[in-house]
Image (cartoon, rainbow, N blue to C red):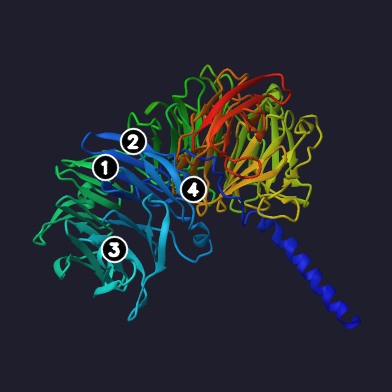
Amino acid sequence: MQGWAGPRTRGFVAIVLLTIILLPIRTHGAGKQLNDSWIEYASYTHARGLAQGGGRIMAYTRGAITDYRHESGELHRVSKLHGLSNSGIVAVYPSMDSRRTIVAYGDGTLDLLQEGEATRSNTQLKLRVASGELGPLTHFCEVEGQLFGASSRWLYSFGPSWLELRDGRPIWSPGAGALSIQALARLGERLLVGTKEGLYVSGQGGRIGGLEPMQSGDYRFLATHGQQAIAVRQEGMPGAEKSFVERVKAGGIEPLAEVDEPVVSLMVHGSSVCITTPTRVLQLASNGAITLLHHISAQQGATGSISGALLTGGGQLYMATARKGFVRLEGDDLRQLSPVSPEFDGAYSIIHGPRGAIFSRGGFAAGRPAGEAFGIFQSDDSNPPASTGSGIVDSEAHDALIIRRLPGDGEDYLVGTGDGRLKRYRGGECIETFDSSNAPLEQGRSGIEVVISDIAIGPEGDWWVYALNAKQELLHRRADGQWAAYASPINPRAYNSAGQAKRAYITLQNKTLWVTSEGDYRMAALPLDQLQEYVDSRGAKGVFRQPIFNENDHKHTVGRKILFSPRGYLWMISGQGLVWSAHPNALLEGGRMKLNVTIGSNPAFTWGNVQLLNELDLTDMIFDSGENLWVGSYAAGLFHIDLKTNDLLHYLTAENSPLPSNHITSLDYNEADGRLYIGTPAGALSVITDSQRPEGDFDRLRVYPNPVRPGFDGLVTVDGLVADAVVKITTTSGDLVRELQSNGGRIHWDLKNGHGQEVVSGVYLLFCSDEKGEKTRVVKLAIIR
């Protein structure tokens, strides 16, 4: 036995070392999914597809649905979707009578919408989808009042409620084996199934069992057309595909037309049949003749690729497009109908405006501006929207890198570009431009363009600007409009052998300007009351510098964005992850502040506290009203940290949330309504969080919905709370049901007691108080099951 002691010990040590090495990676390799209290989204990305039923057309993105009644012209954004707490939308299916709508998500969740609101959810398939056993349901069809849904391999039937999954099985053929489902349609009283292996039809009433083969081939799309169906079969290798359009009858299949490129959508409305390719929209006549309705090149690429099109009986063409979103063709013009349709993809910098998000395109690539055309989009988040939002594109400038709100009503904002310009906007109109002709933005080195790297707005309306490659890189515009220029207190080229400046960041806090750069291992604090001494000494005095040194792992690193928490702590995104200091004034007093890493708990792991966000490439951060920190990363998604406990509250990615990308470029937060704004290269998103600016008292307290009616499966919201409010929920007889504490001015209740059980019908009392019990309020909530 002793002979085994050495090898066993060495094996144990190896396992421990491996665990230590992997630990920082595993802290962000998995995590808690998006909390169900995130219930309202606005997605500022292009339309992914169309669905139609009755008199409705529904255009959907990954995170939102626009519901358009084309006969009345009414437009409504559906955003309170329960399934969005887990992943993005993959399919939308309105019933033929337009009274109900199924919304399917990538994680297997299904929502049932009635009257435009999500009333119930089904999560029966989530575990099976998460395990990889099957994919999400992406195809739906009604046959004789029976709803069917299909994933890539499985076919399900639904109960009368449209959310109860009944029979489900993989479909297969004795000759072809397992079949890959690609489309569903109704053929008379039967279910038609298009697969990669061929076309199959069910027995009477759409029974799942006993599918009969009709024709072999790669059937991509099906659409019901009266008592018949239209099918699209594809042949050919990638790059040389052809599509064959066929009419399917109970007695067989007949060819109708050929299309010399892949088809991406097939939609039928009444007698109108629309076939969509990435560049064309075609109308199919009953005799197989094809008419061109829209061609991208005819619009100089204005729409981008088309993902779906529908021609109504009145001859109006509606399209889901990559650049314009949800549009209607009016003559030669495209009218945007979706309120979330920028003319460009991606969002580099994002802020909240008085009506919604304001975001830009452009950005840095490998430390330099990407060189994209200047573009800004301002959304309208009202519901229903008052406008489709407004886009600004300026071909003379490039890279709208930085957007900052100016003091006032929120209509004024400042944009810094990658070619050395500052553009001031009022709403959608540029009212002032600053460049080398009227501001100290002259090039410091011949042939190297000035880049607006960062902007800080002072409380009195003055601007601090870091202009890379300018003669003097630190600029100040006073509230009276006068400019001054100063030498940078750090060197953004210090660690670049090519002498190229790296991006610099500035933060204004308590009349001190803090400066960091991706090109320098130092940070600097410049007290503004010592600015003259700094100038007179040519930077030798009046400034405090120190290396950015991680005390925990003894590594030097570069600095990025700095923020100060409400408690006065300094938080900084560094090249080694997230660091903080409890005593930033130590630097201003001539000493050196200690920078610490963040040690806290991750809900995905149970073996103790770990270093959070270690060695991650982080991009931006913002505080919410609950004093929690949202942190974006270059490739690992979005993190939410409780700074009171250092716990990782949420870890969000494109795989477990509606985020369009794991690359987070920019974050902003609106304290008034608790909405978080997120920019990514694949588009922008805003979401109502469970944190809202706390009130000073309970005068604006409200609970909704109240009463909770039968079928409601969402969250009850309590708004208007004071900071860190305690909410005790009891029965009318005084029995405690649940105790919650607010994270700012809002909480959500999932209608469950402290043991995780759903509460029964009745009247409940919500006792709200501050932490000391000095301010109190009681409200009633009725629940009807």
Residue sticking out furthest to the front: 733
> Residue under circle 4?
659
- Cα separation between marks 4 and 1: 27 Å
Disc nearer the start of the sequence (3/2): 2
| Residue 25 percent across, percent down from the top left | 66, 58
Residue placed most toward the observer, 130 or 738: 738
In this picture, is 235 found above or below 732?
Answer: below
Task: Name which of mark 3 and mark 1 comes first in the sequence.
Answer: 1
What's under tag 2, amino acid-wise? His
- Residue in front for this viewpoint, 381 or 114: 114
Query: Which amino acid, by three-letter code, is at mark 3?
Result: Gly
Compute the Cα span from label 2 to label 4. 22 Å
**How far across and how far down the image is residue 340, in percent?**
37, 39
Per the image, label 2 sits on a secondary structure element best described as: strand
Above or below — where is 734 with respect to 162? Answer: above
Q: Report x, y in % for residue 670.
A: 53, 30
Q: Earlier in the sequence, mark 1 or mark 2?
A: 1
Q: Is residue 405 left or right of residue 15?
A: left
Pointer 2: what residue?
A: 76
Circle 4 Cα neighbour tier, 10 Å, few/some/many (<14 / 14–19 / ≥20): many
Q: Please, what secondary structure does the residue beneath circle 1 have?
A: strand
| First of labels 4, 1 by sequence position | 1
Secondary structure at numbered mark 4: loop
Q: Is residue 523 visible?
A: yes
Q: Decide: marks 2, 4 in contact (CB < 8 A)?
A: no
Amino acid type of disc 1?
Answer: Arg
